[in-house]
Image (cartoon, coloured by chain):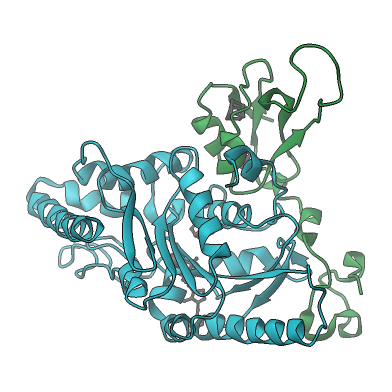
């Protein structure tokens, strides 16, 4: 049984609520955009980024997304699954602008920017 | 052994969109502990009341990708015990696939762990229930407005130990809960926080989760609201807690103590205190002796720990 989030708004009649208020799905909070809470957002300079992953680990909001690109099948030098195959990006829909990632980037690759 | 990169590349089991304050340490702990679970395994998370629970599970929004049960402060561990017992039975009766593995993890704040949920925690530990209890210790009942708990450090300013002309904050020392859990003679107990490249937290979480039987992790998770420090500096605060030996990094495996990090030169505890508004009053000239007292307690506990590690 999946939950239809659209039905479960604040004024939903009790008949539409799930038994025991159970949520029959995982990670439904992505539908809630906490990114609206902030007026500043980090911006990652991809040229400066050394892919160390620190920003991803320290974010309280799982808002630095790692994309692992598998280059193993490509040919030529620098191929194979190396650190360079990762790309760190900010999920602006959810980032709350706390500034932890920017402060802790060892390579000064993150700038907090006003919107 | 799982590599640091492997831990990092694992998909998050805690989704964004939860309502914790910006910069909260508690969810940094939850996310990274869960990265220690093998991607093919499932988790049943139980959660005592507290910031983490009220903010990650707001009907119909859940931040948890795994099964999640909120129960009261008093019985988070008892709930886990029950679920774990049911799981074992289902497995035995063949109602679950042979290769379908579940891990049981309970999260509780310090109020829910050191104080209110202690009885059921102690019981589940004594029964050696196959689960991991993770205490995210932010040193007060934060969700209800920063009331002191038995984890609150001495002299901290909280709303129930307010600093004023007659009070210097909490008059008592904090409870050393990790040690109390060690004395339960469980297979694994450890203390950690956000330190350097997080490998300490990942390794301890992996050990705790994949140790058969009961395990306990105590993670110091700064709370920018209650501690009143500059939010982005969370890792500095943690580092200072470790380098001053206020929050020693150690683990106890089957009764054997091991320091997992030893500061080269122990820093004075005031370097940890000075960054936090909750200790501001200690830096008035007439309160110098209070910092000395604080230091003596840190030294005493550190020396005791060293004795047990050697
Ligand atoms: C038995 C009981 N007493 C009191 C409360 C009110 N209450 C809700 S959250 C909370 C604070 C919990 O503190 P802690 O466990 O340290 O977690 P934190 O909020 O700091 O994350 C309290 C007192 C409750 N829900 N149940
Ligand atoms: S912390 Fe900085 S260098 Fe490291 S991955 Fe993030 S942006 Fe890149
Ligand atoms: S500013 Fe804070 S919430 Fe936003 S991505 Fe950085 S660490 Fe995460
Ligand atoms: S009050 Fe503190 S512990 Fe609670 S969500 Fe806010 S920062 Fe986190
Ligand atoms: Mg607390």
The answer to which quarter of the image holds residue B148 is bottom left
Left or right of B27: which side holds B185?
left
Quadrant of ligand 3: it is top right
Chain B image colour = cyan
Q: Which chain is green?
A: A
Would residue B254 be found to the left or right of residue A62 on screen? left
Seen at 70% across and 26% down, the residue is A82
Q: Residue B203's x, y, as percent?
A: 51, 51
- Residue B139 against residue A69 in the figure, above or below: below
Q: Residue at x 24, y 36 (%)?
A: B264
Is residue A70 depicted above or below B296 in this figure?
above
The quadrant of the picture occupied by the C terminus of chain B is bottom left
User: From the viewer's perspective, is B162 left or right of A75?
Assistant: left
Q: Position of residue B72 (x, y in %)?
A: 56, 83
Q: Quadrant of residue B176?
A: bottom left
Q: Quadrant of residue B129?
A: bottom right
Residue B275, horizontal then vertical, whole percent:
31, 43
Q: Residue at x 74, y 85 (%)?
A: B92
Nearer to me, A20 or B214: B214
Which residue appears at 18% of the width and 46% of the height? B283
């Amino acid at each position: 049984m999946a939950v239809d989030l659209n039905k479960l708004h604040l004024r939903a009649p009790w008949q539409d609520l799930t038994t025991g208020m159970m949520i029959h799905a995982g990670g439904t909070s992505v539908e809630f955009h906490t990114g609206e809470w902030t007026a500043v957002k980090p911006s990652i300079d991809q040229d400066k980024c050394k892919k160390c992953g620190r920003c991803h680990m320290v974010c309280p909001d799982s808002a630095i997304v790692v994309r692992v690109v598998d280059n193993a099948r490509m040919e030529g030098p620098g191929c194979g699954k190396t650190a360079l195959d990762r790309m760190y990006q900010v999920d602006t829909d959810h980032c709350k602008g706390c500034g932890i990632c920017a402060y802790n980037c060892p390579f000064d690759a993150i700038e907090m920017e006003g919107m | 052994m799982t590599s640091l990169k492997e831990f990092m590349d694992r998909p998050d089991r805690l989704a964004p969109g939860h309502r914790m304050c910006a910069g909260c340490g508690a969810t940094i702990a939850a996310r990274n502990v869960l990265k220690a679970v093998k991607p093919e395994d499932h988790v049943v998370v139980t959660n005592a009341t507290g910031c983490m629970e009220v903010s990650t599970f707001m009907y119909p929004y859940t931040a948890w990708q795994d099964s999640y049960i909120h129960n009261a402060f008093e019985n988070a561990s008892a709930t886990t015990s029950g679920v774990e017992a049911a799981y074992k039975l289902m497995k035995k009766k063949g109602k679950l696939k042979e290769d379908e593995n579940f891990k049981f993890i309970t999260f509780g704040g310090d109020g829910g762990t050191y104080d209110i949920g202690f009885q059921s925690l102690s019981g589940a530990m004594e029964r050696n229930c196959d689960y991991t209890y993770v205490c995210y210790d932010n040193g007060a009942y934060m969700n209800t407005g920063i009331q002191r708990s038995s984890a609150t450090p001495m002299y901290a300013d909280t709303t129930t130990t307010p600093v004023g002309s007659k009070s210097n904050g909490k008059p008592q020392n904090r409870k050393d809960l990790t040690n109390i859990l060690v004395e339960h003679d469980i297979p694994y107990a450890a203390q950690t926080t956000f330190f350097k490249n997080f490998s300490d937290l990942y390794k301890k979480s992996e050990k705790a989760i994949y140790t058969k039987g009961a395990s306990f992790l105590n993670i110091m998770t700064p709370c920018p609201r209650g501690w009143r420090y500059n939010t982005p500096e969370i890792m500095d605060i943690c580092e200072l807690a470790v380098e001053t030996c206020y929050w020693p990094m150690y683990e106890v495996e089957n009764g054997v103590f091991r320091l997992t990090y030893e500061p080269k030169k122990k820093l004075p505890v005031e370097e940890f205190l000075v960054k936090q508004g909750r200790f501001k009053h200690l830096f008035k000239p007439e309160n110098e002796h209070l910092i000395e007292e604080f230091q003596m307690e840190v030294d005493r506990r550190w020396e005791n720990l060293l004795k047990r590690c050697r």
